[in-house]
Image (spheres, rainbow, N blue to C red):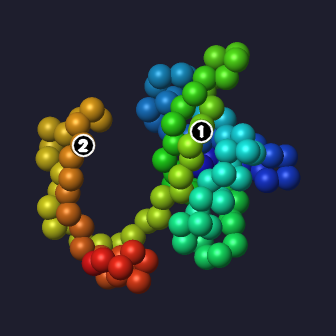
């Protein structure tokens, strides 16, 4: 998340891939940000109280175009960062069209997700 102003009700995502495709940052509407915060709360991220999006948050999102043709984020999900050791990296020939898997071991994953 590049910026998000809860009072004004919108923000922007800086994403290299979408900047190359659309030539601009991706807009985050207040309704989408609120849905992401509610999903975090239900999924156990950030405690029991919904936390609004903030600068430097990592998110996954889909892009839809506005009526004017500008990119807007939807189906936003906040991503948590964990510290760990890469045991098996994904293959170097991986592309966005093919799902590839690596393996990471982290002591932080046990209390958060029940796996190491």
Indicate the quadrant where residue 94 lies. Answer: top left
- Measured as percent of width and height from the top left, residue 38 is found at 66, 60
Question: As drawn, is 43 to the left or to the right of 33?
Answer: left
Find residue 71 and report its horizontal and vertical position in percent.
Answer: 60, 27
Q: Which numbered disc covers residue 99? A: 2
Residue that appears at 15% across and 43% down: 92
In percent of the image, x 57 and y 27: which residue is there? 64
Left or right of residue 88: residue 40? right
Comparing 39 with 64, the one in front is 39
The image position of residue 41, as x and y in percent, is: 62, 67
Q: Residue furthest top?
A: 68
Compared with residue 63, is residue 10 higher up or lower down, i.e. above or below?
Answer: below
Mark 1 nearby-residue class (10 Å; few <14, some 14–19, many ≥20): many
Q: Which mark is residue 35?
A: none
At horizontal 55% and vertical 23% (from top left) the residue drawn is 23
Q: Earlier in the sequence, mark 2 or mark 1?
A: 1
Secondary structure beneath dot 1 equals strand
Quadrant in the rendering for residue 44: bottom right
Q: In this view, does 82 lie to the left or right of 41?
A: left
Name the element at disc 2. loop
- Which class describes the residues within 10 Å of circle 2: few (<14), some (14-19), or many (20+)? few
Residue lying at the far right in this picture: please name it. Answer: 7
Q: How many labels does the image show?
A: 2
Report the residue marked by disc 1: 74
State yes or no: discs 2 and 1 in contact (Cβ < 8 Å).
no
Q: In the shown orientation, is residue 64 left or right of residue 10?
A: left
- Residue 54 falls in which quadrant of the image? bottom right
Name above or below for residue 111 compared with residue 100. Answer: below
**Residue 55 in sight:** no
């Amino acid at each position: 998340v590049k910026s998000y102003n809860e009072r004004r009700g919108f923000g922007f995502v800086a994403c290299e891939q979408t900047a190359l495709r659309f030539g601009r940052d991706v807009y985050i509407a207040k309704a989408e940000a609120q849905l992401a915060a509610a999903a975090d709360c239900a999924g156990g991220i950030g405690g029991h109280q919904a936390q609004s999006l903030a600068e430097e948050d990592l998110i996954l999102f889909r892009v839809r175009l506005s009526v004017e043709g500008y990119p807007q984020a939807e189906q936003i999900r906040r991503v948590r960062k964990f510290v760990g050791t890469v045991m098996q990296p994904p293959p170097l020939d991986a592309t966005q069209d093919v799902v590839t898997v690596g393996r990471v071991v982290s002591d932080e994953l046990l209390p958060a997700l029940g796996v190491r």
